[in-house]
Image (spheres, rainbow, N blue to C red):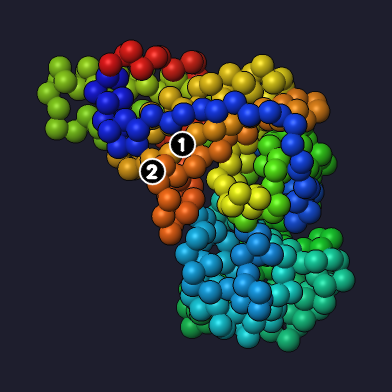
Amino acid sequence: MAFRHRMVSALIGMAAMTWLPAAASAREDADLRVLMALLPASVFTSAEQGYVEYLGLAQLLGKDGSLSSEHLARLAWGANIRPVAALGADPALFRARSGIGLSDLRWLAGFGQAPQEISLWGFPDASAAQGAFDGLADLGFARAGLLPGVLANGDPGAMDFARSDVADPWRGPMGRTSTVTLRDAALLQAATSADFAPVLGASTTALESDAGRIALAGVEYESEGVIQALILSPLAVGAQSVDPAFLIGKTQEEAQAAFEAEVANISAGLPLYSGAILAEVVTPSGAQAVLSLAYPSCAEAEEALARAPLLWTMMNPAYVPAAARLTGQTVDAAPGCAARIVLAPAEDSEAGNLPVLRSVVTGIQFRDVAILRIGSAPAAAAAD
């Protein structure tokens, strides 16, 4: 434990927590709220559905409605969203291949795990979404069997490498067909119509859930718009396991000591939270990386804020986490309270918040991210 703590501290330094007042102006983010009104509440309670990726195109696009390589370079996630992958291939071809202009969209999102993942296309209103849906007929889409309101551009879930096109969001690099349906002001894209079930069959939405309302309050606090966000379930990111790779090359005695230290390390974490949103938001002072955690009371949220700086120093050094300064505040949000943690890069650079955001995302992918782990209060730095 002592060796690992010193090594991490050498890489990123000790973050400092500042206590800020809870009362501040907040503007509702209409686009993120539209997405959360489509998603099931299970995004906060499932370990199998993965996390939700969201990109606020209204915040990313240039004044001329274009998306440049510079805009794409600031994204910390989104490659699993089919239209975003197509944009990464060639933004200039997007309208021709998709039949939809970027300026016609408000946001893009992805939900679920392959091969049942869903890509969501967000429009300004239901009329615009209907127009885009109707226009799919010009791109080879037709009614999918006997299902009303569902279109497909081939046999559901089929792949045809002769039709592969990385710049085409409806086909992609594997030539995989798409099945599309309409829901309010959004198009839902998946491999088969059965994949829509978590969204179309939801009895309670993420926006209606306590976890969703509380976590969203922390994101919207002092925000003028959400650039990108991850919606996270504590069941998926709060429970983590020991990675045996760190035992390689050690003697039996060294391995035993290292294992015991690792077990002690992963027992440290946050108080149990019911939902989390990691986001980059626009604020009056510039873009901020924010982690918002949903708690039933502000006492528990304050405890999370108190633990956060030391937990950041416990981020796995194998993933080279970025140096960061942590500040935070609690945000009252009936029926609970959000712990709003700002993850600021320790040094200003052209990369902005990207290194900090990617540090968290990398940890999530390897199921080893101390800043989201649920556990006991971390030992004091005196463990050195």
274 lies left or right of 175: right
Question: Which secondary structure, mark 2?
Answer: loop
Image label count: 2
Q: Which residue is mark 2?
A: 322
Check the picture and name the quadrant holding the N terminus: top left
Q: Is residue 299 above or below residue 132?
A: above
Image quadrant where residue 228 sits: bottom right
Q: Is residue 71 above or below residue 277?
A: below
Q: Is residue 294 above or below residue 187?
A: above
Q: Residue furthest left?
A: 251
- Is residue 70 in sight in this rendering? yes
Residue at the image position 68 percent from the left and 28 percent from the top: 21
Q: Mark 1 or mark 2, which is nearer to you? A: 1
Q: Amino acid at mark 1?
A: Arg
Q: Nearer the viewer, residue 379 or 241?
A: 379
Residue at the image position 70 percent from the left and 78 percent from the top: 100
Q: CA distance from mark 1 to mark 2?
A: 10 Å
Q: Which residue is mark 1?
A: 325
Residue at the image position 22 percent from the left and 29 percent from the top: 247
Q: Nearer the viewer, residue 26 or 206?
A: 26
Question: Which secondary structure, mark 1?
Answer: strand
What is the x, y in percent for residue 114? 54, 55
231 lies left or right of 180: left
Q: Amino acid at mark 2?
A: Ala
- Is residue 51 in sight in this rendering? no
Query: Within 10 Å of the Cα at label 2, are there few (<14), some (14-19), or many (20+) other Cα atoms?
Result: many
Image quadrant where residue 177 sits: bottom right
